[in-house]
Image (cartoon, rainbow, N blue to C red):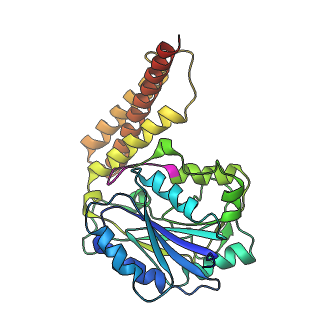
Amino acid sequence: MTMPRLVFAFCTFNRADRLEKLVAAMRAQVCSIPFEILAINNNSTDATVEKLIQLAQMHGPNFRWVTEKEQGIVPARNRAIQEALNSDVLVFIDDDELPLPGLLQAVTHAINEEGADCVGGPIRIDFSPHERPKWLGRELIGFLGEIDYGPSAFWVQDGATPVWSGNVAYRMEILRSQPDLRFDPRYNREGAGIGGGSDAIMFRAFLNGNYKIRYRPDMAITHFVEPWRLVRGYFLKLHYKAGIRQGQHQLPSYPRAILGVPPFMVSQFITQCFKFLYLQMKGQSVALRQGMNVAHAFGRMIGMHRRWQEARKKLAANP
């Protein structure tokens, strides 16, 4: 069988009830080049395997699936890259999303006609069948994955307009020629866990590599938000986890530190806490946003301390 020129992939874990509608929408896409749908099953324990077998037998563009036994979104996405290495284009979507009509047409035009190496588009949040909480303002929607940079296509020049792996496409020539350009396992997220950030690191790698990144408003998807994310605690945990990863893997080491944590970070954390308490007592609607800053600052200190602990363990193991 000739390898399809475009692979439309999703990674899935325990969302068997969503797969039929997702694959139907993927198969309904119009594409100017041959494409197949690829599912990466990440050790699901529900009826996912049975559903994938059923979907593979249905009419439409070719559908195949594999199981990635290493748990987490990073191994699953990297497995998709490996499975699609001989194709021209790899498009990612998540298993809690639906592609809107025209997505693959936008991708192929951006890569084949406009010369893009990476393409991303709008991610539109759908709260149905649940109601959007009244406290969930526009300033917080982006932390649920929403992207909307307006109605015009443009070249992404900096980190102010990132594209995420819930709706992104790559020119596979880039990933074939750069075997180290993969999703970073240090930012893995397992199962239904919170956080991650590997897609942000991949975006930054493409940006720093001077690859051509295109935003296409006609490459759109709908993202359905599960109710467990629609609580304040989710936003706090998300920022705490992001702070840990930043402190552990991104921030520089400081010569003046206590147990790995520089004193200025402690001062910043205390300042953020006082600001949060003030806003909370005043009943300000921005108190949650400030609480997220507190959680992130605390996470950064934990991450720095963990890095210090890891360095001590390595030193003890190799005196």
Q: Position of residue 75 (x, y in %)?
A: 47, 52
Lateral position of residue 54 relative to residue 264, left or right: left
Residue 194 inside the magenta-drawn segment:
yes
Quadrant of residue 12 in the image?
bottom left
Q: Residue at x 52, y 35 (%)?
A: 249
Quadrant of residue 168 in the image?
bottom right
Instruction: Kindly tell me whether residue 16 is visible in this rendering.
Output: yes
Lateral position of residue 283 relative to residue 177, left or right: left
Residue 3 inside the magenta-drawn segment:
no
Of the 4 image quadrants, the one containing the N terminus is bottom right
Q: Position of residue 64 (x, y in %)?
A: 46, 74
> How many discs appear?
0
* Between 266 and 272, the one nearer to me in the picture: 266
Above or below 89: residue 208: above
Above or below 118: residue 129: below
Above or below 94: residue 129: below
Report the magenta residues as a range: 190-198
Outermost residue, front side: 1
Outermost residue, bottom side: 59
Q: Position of residue 273 (x, y in %)?
A: 34, 33
Q: Position of residue 127 (x, y in %)?
A: 31, 71
* Between 277 and 89, the one nearer to me in the picture: 89
Magenta-colored segment: predominant secondary structure: loop
Q: Residue at x 36, y 75 (%)?
A: 53
Q: Residue at x 42, y 58 (%)?
A: 139
Outermost residue, top side: 319
Instruction: Kindly tell me whether residue 260 is visible in this rendering.
Output: no
